[in-house]
Image: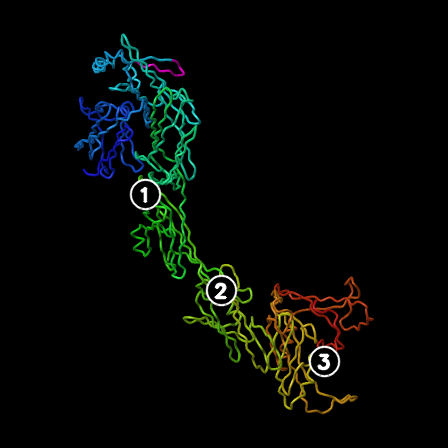
Amino acid sequence: PPGFVESSCHSRIFWMKLNKLFLQGKFFHLEINDPYTGPVLLDEKLASRCGYVLSEDVWGNPVFRASVLGCHVANEADELFTLTVNIKVSSFSSMRAAVTYIYPMYCSYSSWASREIVCEENYMEVSVKTDVPAVSNDYTVAWLSALPETQNVAYQQWQLMFVSPSGRKRITVSDATKLGYSFNNTLSRVYLRAPYHSNESDLSMVSGVNMNMVTSTSMYRQRWLLLLIDTTVSCPVDGISFTDTTLKWTVPSVIPTLVVQEATFLSKTILMGVDGQVIIKPEEKNYLLEHNETHISITIPIGAEGGKLKSSVSGGVYGVIYSIDLFLEHTWTDADWQTTKYTAIKSITTPFMPQIPTVINNTLPEERLFSAALGHFLPDVSLVAIAIGNVPFTLREAQHHGFKIYETPFSNRTKGFILEVSFDDPYVLKEYVNRNETKYTLLINYTLRVGPEMMPYYHSAEVECVVADMELPEAVGYCDEENLYQAIPTFGLHQYWNLYLGNKLLNRHVALTNGYLAATNSTHLILQIPLFSVGVTYEEVSFQKIKARFDIALRKVRTMETLQMFSVSCSFNSSSFIICHSDGTIMISAQMKTVPAIDMSKTKLRDSSCKPTEYNEDHVFFKFHVTTCGTSVRFEGDHIVYENEISYEKETLPGQSIPTITRDPDYRLTVLCYYRAKETLVLGAFAGDPSTSSPSGSGMMLPRSNIAVRRRIRQALNVVSRVSKDETFMEFYKPSMAILKQPGEPVFLEVELKDESPSTELHLKNCWVTRSPDFNSTPRWNITVDG
């Protein structure tokens, strides 16, 4: 069929190439059609002996080469050569029902050199021109006319003598054939074809290149004539070197076994070719042909035109292999031979070269679209499947899901595979990072088929993109007469961030414990915080006025990093309040309405020196510490209770033992502050300013009618105190005994808790002396303050 076979003739070699597209899924054999004996099946043994090569070019097309001096070639006067090949094609490996295509090839070659050497892939061939000397001018025509007869019997008369390191060996032509050699003569030439690495060959190093050499002499004997012909042949077996970017083929310029008199050597022409075609200007294809006195070299950039890059996989790693078919033709002269034409043909394949693919991140954040290009690959690589986040997809399934997958060409004749995935795809990982950004991560596993062998190759990639697409919530704060409020958007709450009250997570339990009310709607969480509840900071406390603030921290769920503080601050008018700070400061605003009215400037605490800091007609404002102003302390359950009293005493005239009749009322207001006994209090956040401290206690004010009740509670504990006579605590004073002590003299006190309840503990906080049995009387002298 047209396009199936392509043939040419170059340097006395038949070249035939079959188009592999016509042979897909089929089997083929080649037969050599001998004009006298018929078809002969081509096999490997026959090929090396008869001067045939059957291989593939770098593109996978079958290639057949044959020497014009090969077997079964029709020779017309050593100038026109014909070889007919039968190409048998079948759909079965047994070759039954084969179709046979008969293909004749012609080669015209008359410019024979005195000696021609061919170094093929599987054989070495030397042919030498034979000049039969004339006895005299009178017998020239007769001699020439007798040559055809001589040719008929020449096959039996030729002998070969081989010289090798093991010695000399003389054998007949028929014996040489049995050893894999081929020897014959034509009208004007004698040729010897030898396999590589035979027993008669020798391996030697010439200018750094290993050469396989067969040293032989062909002898022809008649009664009156002895013809000796040097049929030595030598061919390179290596000389190939590689770098990351080039391959280099080196052969010696001068081969000593072929040039006996090196002083007379003269190089005439050097040609190079690729795939059977002579390259006239190698530099135009980036080839480099160099030669000097010792070497001829051809340097080819890996991937250059004329060769082929093929994808491969080795040990799970993707890489490429580059192949190219080169030939070198060197013509020289020397004193022994008029002209020698030396042709070497070499198919070169590089070692496996890893080419780790990369993923080029062309993601478009403004379009919220991942765009990842995997490359670079040769055209013989195909993408067959992907997995996103360990979820596998065929290409069809991926397209149906909404992923976009397509090939894209690159400038260096490679290609890549582009995958486009939306940020909002459920298989994309999302992570809240920094302050207002989201990190989107696309985990990809590619499955590819590589090379003509369709080897599987797997590649994993991770593509990330950080986008500032998070809007931090903004809280709205407001107040009413008794409460502070925070309205906080619920988007992202508990998913990206949490609310914290100090260092404590603000959840429903904490809110209920602290007395907050929490409600949610479709968009917001609304917190109601009573003015006198835990967590409220009092920025300013004055007469009948409180400036309060409530702070909530917005923190990341994962890192606990504080992103934002939500604060609401309001001023409240309050006629009566008590604030018990964690540092022990007590602030009281008390409304004292009496009939008749009293002089508020004359109110006091237990310690009469403790006067109000502010007052008006019916209000007073006291600020004091729990360790001052006669404040007492006791335990009630798991609380420590500090107690003091605001009082107003009737005036008496000086020097009178009997009170003066007065309209001033007797007024007493008991003040109580409760603190948890075992609670650790954090004070550092309030800069030591009691007015801005977070209250850790709860307060209570009781009018006089409740005092007796409170005192009965205080006496419920069975506490006994005694005064020892000395430090041994062995003898004690009687309870009713008067004790006289000088200033500076120690007093030995013992306080004992008789209560047997395991939950009751004794802590000695303050100890003082009064003039009367009433321990709340004044004046008083402190012995122990704050333990």
Residue 234 percent location from the top left of the image: 37, 23
Residue 599 in sight: yes
Give whichever of discs 2 and 3 has the lower sequence position.
2
Q: Position of residue 495 (x, y in %)?
A: 45, 62
Residue 764 sits inside the magenta stretch: no
- Mark 1 or 3, which is nearer the eye? 1
510 w.r.t. 50: above or below: below
**Disc 2 designates what residue?**
498
Q: Which residues are magenta?
A: 159-167
Q: Nearer the viewer, mark 2 or mark 1?
A: 1
Q: Amino acid at mark 1?
A: Asp
Q: CA distance from mark 2 to mark 3?
A: 50 Å
Q: Is residue 499 left or right of residue 729?
A: left
* Mark 2 to mark 1 CA distance (whole Å): 54 Å
Mark 3 crowdedness (10 Å alpha carbons): few <14, some 14-19, many ≥20: some
Residue drawn at point x = 59 percent, y = 83 percent: 575
Q: Nearer the viewer, residue 522 or 762?
A: 522
Mark 3, residue position: 608
Residue holding disc 1: 380
- Name the quadrant containing residue 78: top left
Viewed as shown, does residue 751 lie left or right of 425?
A: right
Q: Amino acid at mark 3?
A: Ser
Which numbered dot is residue 233? Answer: none
Relative vertical location of residue 660 with respect to residue 301 in this rendering, above or below? below
